[in-house]
Amino acid sequence: MSDLTYNVDVMASNDKPLVWLSVVVKSPPFSKDARLEAGFLLRKLQKGQMLEMPHSRPMPVVGERCHELRVIDVDKTWRIIYRIDSDAIVILDVFGKKTRTTPQSVIDRSRKRLREYDDA
């Protein structure tokens, strides 16, 4: 049995929806400025813009078309793992990153959520 739950957010009819898989970006723990920055970058993705460093980098270890969005906050750097689908931006995980490498637990959780989402 899957524990996958998701929400879909759409801003305009021509934008790709954001599909949130069991995660949210909210204040707290994000500061207001970091939440706004994340929203701004996610809107760019919804409109079809590709983001590059320093805002985003590919995450092929998670899967095809997967990326890691970087949001700098007051006391930590947030990461948003997402996949760009033809019809949506799928948000896989949101976490505070403390080291250079992405924790294996985040990679495993993101892969599992992708499998469940693709199978649903």
Image (cartoon, rainbow, N blue to C red):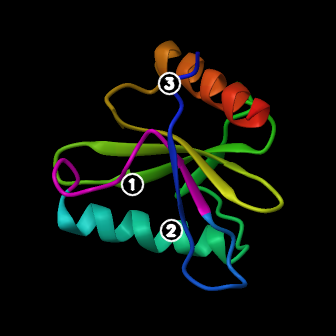
Q: Which residues are magenta?
A: 18-30
Counting residues from the start of the chain, the first of labels 1 and 2 encountered is 2
Q: Which mark is residue 71?
A: 1
Return the residue nearer the eye: 37 or 119: 119
Q: Which residue is mark 3?
A: 3
Q: Which quadrant of the figure contains the N terminus?
A: top right
x 19%, y 57%: residue: 27
Q: Is disc 2 placed on a helix, strand or loop?
A: helix
User: Which of the 4 quarters of the picture holds residue 8?
Assistant: bottom right
x 69%, y 70%: residue: 16
Query: Spatial distance from mark 1 to mark 3, Cα to Cα?
Result: 27 Å
Relative to 2, is 14 above or below?
A: below
x 39%, y 54%: residue: 71
Asked if disc 1 and disc 2 are in contact, CB closer than 8 Å, the reply is yes
Query: Spatial distance from mark 3 to mark 2, Cα to Cα?
Result: 28 Å
Q: Is disc 1 placed on a helix, strand or loop?
A: strand
- Inspect the image, locate mark 1, and give the three-letter code of the amino acid beneath it: Val
Q: Which residue is mark 2?
A: 41
Q: Is disc 3 placed on a helix, strand or loop?
A: loop
Counting residues from the start of the chain, the first of labels 3 and 2 encountered is 3
Return the residue nearer the eye: 23 or 47: 23
Query: Spatial distance from mark 1 to mark 2, Cα to Cα?
Result: 9 Å
Q: Is residue 103 visible to the viewer in this orientation of the structure? A: yes
Residue 65, percent from left and from top: 78, 45
Relative to 119, is 31 above or below?
A: below
29 in magenta: yes
